[in-house]
Amino acid sequence: MTNGPEPWEPGSGPVSAGRPDLRRYAPATMRNRDAIATVLRDALPPAGLVLEVASGSGEHAVHFADAFPDLDWQPSDPDPAALASIAAWRADAHRPNLRPPIRLDAAADWPIAQADAVLCINMVHISPWDATLGLLKGAGAILPPGGLLYLYGPYLRDGVDTAPSNLAFDASLRARDPHWGLRRLEHVIAAAEAQGLAFDRLVEMPANNLSLLFHRQD
């Protein structure tokens, strides 16, 4: 990413029956959703349930539910405001394959027992390391053999120069919260493998981001 984390913006839609528009907007979503969908098109199963961890505003869930109509999409987030935004986007989208959001804290016990794929976009660096460990543990527990875990965001890599914009982003994150910051790819892979998730490949993405693909081992 080229700048610091972009704040959600309150929904600017019309007020209906005196109620505010609860949808939130993450500007980065418009920039990365199509590139992510391109990677997912060759990686997701043809049918089944996809759990999105840390869905944020809910815009990705709506876009992917539309792009992959044969898959059921389960958005989640620990933040009540995010859950309200996701529900509002879902109500506006009228997608039959987009489920109501559930409250899920990646670092705590998960309220879902099975999913055919797990997605997590831009959470790993904007959360404590325990959240990433919880994400990997949870994904390893609910995915079937061969099931996909997809991560998206900026990472540090051994032997690869980090873009100055990502170094600045990392510094800004750690200034906001010392438990946040860009994670080293090799540490994430090692933690994933400890949960039975084999690293498959990475895909270079726009704005110095990476797509990371893991699969549940047999």
Image: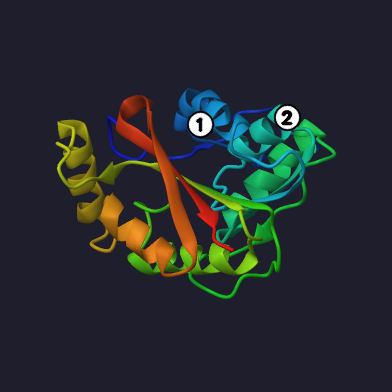
Mark sitting on residue 29:
1
- 65 versus 144 height, above or below: above
Asked whether residue 19 appears in the rendered view, the answer is no
Image spot of residue 162 (x, y percent): 17, 37
Asked whether residue 109 appears in the rendered view, the answer is yes
Report, in whole angstroms, how far the alpha carbon at label 2 lies from the one at label 1: 15 Å
Which residue is under mark 2?
A: 66
Its colouring scheme is rainbow
Quarter containing the C terminus: bottom right
Q: How many marks?
A: 2
User: What residue appears at the point 70 percent right and 38 percent down from the top-left corner?
Assistant: 89
Identify the mark nearer the N-term, 2 or 1.
1
Image spot of residue 173 (x, y percent): 26, 50
Give the image quarter of residue 3: top left
Image spot of residue 12 (x, y percent): 60, 29
Quarter containing the N terminus: top left
User: What residue appears at the point 65 percent right and 42 percent down from the top-left corner?
Assistant: 22
Left/right placement of residue 186 relative to residue 114 reads left
Amino acid at pointer 2: Asp
User: What residue appears at the point 69 percent right and 28 percent down from the top-left corner?
Assistant: 67
